[in-house]
Image (spheres, rainbow, N blue to C red):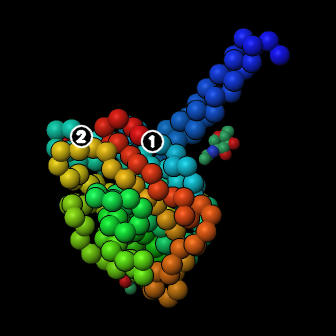
């Protein structure tokens, strides 16, 4: 095939793929009509992160969506301030509790044996809530970001709930690839 044509074709495929993802993510209609400035589809586990960053007070309003899961799962998303992946991550967690309500809370993870017990994070989270519909959990929160930076490691997960106990996530496939970085000021 002609070189120029190949280049054009590849460019248009790349463009339409990027467009479709961005388009999907930014056209998502939240039930509470909330609008966020930015969104990125995360590479695995049907997850999308939406946020608005406010430089004036260094806070971020965010929504973490994790789709394709039953309401008997837990989901979690977190920032890792000093490290990467699971240990040290400062998590937002949601699951359906024994009252049948979607319970959202914060949990700092310090061990591979964590059951995601409720606890304060290393930064302030003045607001957190969650909902579940269409096989998707959405966690809404406001984070007061650690001072002096907007770029962090992030990780996200899902696993099963047994009674009120959050059990370990799958130890294979995409559940071991669900980490990366995020820059709240610059997008990625
Ligand atoms: C994005 O849109 C495409 C085309 O409409 C659709 O096939 C795909 O399932 C959508 N993806 C998400 C994550 O909504
Ligand atoms: C941060 O500033 C924005 C813009 O002024 C404001 O809308 C928001 O409520 C503030 N957030 C907090 C947690 O104070
Ligand atoms: C379930 O979660 C809701 C919402 O966070 C909370 O009000 C309720 O106390 C929780 N129930 C139990 C049994 O923990």
> With respect to residue 10, does 162 lie above or below?
below
Q: Position of residue 139 (x, y in %)?
A: 41, 60
Report whether 124 appears left or right of 45.
left
Please tell me which residue lies in front, 98 or 113: 113
Identify the residue at image location x=40%, y=79%: 114
Q: Which residue is mark 2?
A: 54
The quadrant of the image that shows the N terminus is top right
| Direction right: furthest residue | 1
Task: Residue 94: name its quadrant.
Answer: bottom left
Give the class, few, some or many, for how many residues have Cα within 10 Å of label 1's Cα (few <14, many ≥20): many
Q: Which residue is mark 1?
A: 39
Identify the residue at image location x=37%, y=77%: 111
Instruction: Determine the secondary structure under disc 2.
Output: strand
Q: How many marks?
A: 2
Task: Residue 155: name its quadrant.
Answer: bottom left
Q: Is residue 17 visible?
A: yes
Ligand 2 contact, mark 2 (Cβ < 8 Å): yes
The quadrant of the image that shows the C terminus is top left
| Separation of marks 1 and 2 at Cα, in angstroms | 15 Å
Q: Position of residue 92 (x, y in %)?
A: 36, 65
Q: Earlier in the sequence, mark 1 or mark 2?
A: 1
> With respect to residue 103, does 45 lie above or below?
above
> With respect to residue 71, does 181 lie above or below?
above
């Amino acid at each position: 095939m002609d070189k120029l044509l190949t280049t054009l074709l590849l460019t248009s495929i790349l463009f339409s793929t990027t467009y479709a993802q961005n388009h999907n993510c930014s056209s998502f209609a939240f039930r509470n009509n909330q609008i966020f400035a930015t969104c990125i589809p995360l590479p695995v586990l049907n997850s999308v992160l939406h946020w608005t960053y406010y430089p004036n007070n260094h806070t971020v309003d965010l929504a973490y969506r994790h789709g394709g899961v039953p309401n008997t799962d837990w989901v979690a998303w977190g920032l890792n301030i000093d490290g990467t992946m699971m240990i040290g991550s400062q998590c937002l967690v949601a699951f359906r509790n024994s009252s049948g309500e979607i319970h959202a809370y914060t949990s700092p993870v310090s061990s591979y044996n964590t059951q995601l017990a409720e606890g304060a994070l290393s930064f302030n989270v003045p607001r957190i809530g969650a909902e579940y519909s269409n096989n998707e959990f959405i966690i809404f929160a406001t984070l007061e970001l650690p001072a002096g930076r907007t770029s962090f490691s992030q990780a996200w997960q899902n696993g099963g709930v047994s009674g009120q106990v959050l059990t370990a996530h799958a130890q294979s496939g995409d559940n071991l690839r669900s980490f990366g970085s995020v820059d709240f000021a610059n997008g990625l």
